[in-house]
Image (cartoon, grey):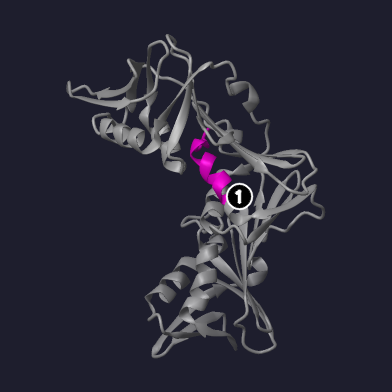
Amino acid sequence: MQLTEASRDAVLKPLTTVVGIVERRNTLPILANVLIRKQAEAVEFIANDLEVQITTRSAFGVGDETQSTTVAARKLLDILRALPESSVVKMSLDDNRLTVQAGRSRFALQTMEAIDYPLVNPVDQWDASFSMPQKALRDLFNQVHFAMAHQDIRHYLNGLLLVLEPGKIRVVATDGHRLAHAGTALEAQSATQDVIIPRKTVHEMQRLLADDEQSMVQVDVSGSQIRFRFEHIEVISKLIEGKYPDYQRVIPTDYECHFDVGREALQAALQRAAILTTDKLRGVRIQLGDHLMRVSASNTENEEAREEIEIDYPHGPLDVAFNVTYLLDVLASLKADSVRWFIQPNTSSSVLITLAGDDEFRYVVMPMRI
């Protein structure tokens, strides 16, 4: 029984959208599959890993029948990618095998029953709902995602805190060594709620959201799930349970001294200095004084790198070291021409990095010993 017929690219696009969350190794073999559901001309591709589920909807079904099956996701993806771009792809289901045909190419793939596929069903009631441009949400995630922890035993750090306030949305990420905060105004938002979105979900949303001010994303939030709906895509994710650290206490407010430095100039200097750091010791030394920012690095082989950047700095001297990756991460995520550093001269305390034209972006990085 024929399921679909469409150009290769028309089938490839929705499949590529969902395959990103399919793990190569699964405790449940069926999770390596993609669920294909057809109802008349409507066709859905669904993938999930029991934590996050992505659904795409297209209209290239053939016939009025309702059919569903599951097939190896990455195998189907590889087949479609290998076919000529101009191909017309037909998929049909017979005797528990999915046949993919394009021109003189034909593939018969084993399937597993759709009824056995474990779906993440949305909650009955959402506590808060709002919509915003896809680009705005994507930019928020891009400004803080790098500060999320990775496989930390404090599981609540392995994600991003989303804070809803009347008329505002904030996102916060920290791994205990640095903290990134960003926010923006939000129309028609009156609920107050904090939820922790898993790291994997954040990365998938960064991949899927369009860099488009006109296209909107609808977001629904409950105590256990978050749902994103945009274009022909739906993402439902479980949330991380736990109490997120009080980010407001971490962000310093008493720094009186600040200076601006060119983002690209600082990024380039740090990248060059980082060449002489090691994987185990990623520290660079930052020295301020005489209207100069001096960046230096050394290693156990007695090699040394030195960089100087002219800045407008009339304050007391500062000599402190940081993990160079923490500084490069934030500079790579920003689009501004310059960044503003807030410091306490003559101390080895944390540094606050902000943007002159954005009151909501704040990045706190702790010093290190080298």
- Image quadrant assignment for residue 298: top left
Residue 92 visible: no
Residue 198 visible: yes
Closest to the observer: 229 or 81? Answer: 229
Q: Which region is colored magenta?
A: 138-152
Q: Amino acid at mark 1?
A: Leu
**Image position of 305 (left or right of 358):** left
Label 1 neighbour load within 10 Å: few <14, some 14-19, many 20+: many
Residue 335, image x and y in percent?
Answer: 46, 44
**Image position of 240 (left or right of 264):** right
Q: Is residue 140 magenta?
A: yes
**Vertical placement of 72 versus 250: above or below?**
below
Q: Residue at x 35, y 21 (%)?
A: 286
**Vertical placement of 6 versus 256: above or below?**
below
Residue 237, image x and y in percent?
Answer: 65, 51
Q: Of helix, strand and loop, which mostly describes the magenta segment? A: helix
Looking at the figure, which quarter contains the C terminus? Answer: top left
Dot 1: element: helix
Q: Residue at x 68, y 57 (%)?
A: 120
Closest to the observer: 369 or 37? Answer: 369
Closest to the observer: 273 or 336? Answer: 336
Q: Is residue 81 magenta?
A: no
Looking at the figure, which quarter contains the N terminus? Answer: bottom right
The residue at which mark 1 appears reads as 137
Q: Residue at x 67, y 69 (%)?
A: 115
Residue 326, image x and y in percent?
Answer: 42, 31
Residue 28, image x and y in percent?
Answer: 56, 57
Q: Residue at x 77, y 39 (%)?
A: 192
**Vertical placement of 369 versus 107: above or below?**
above
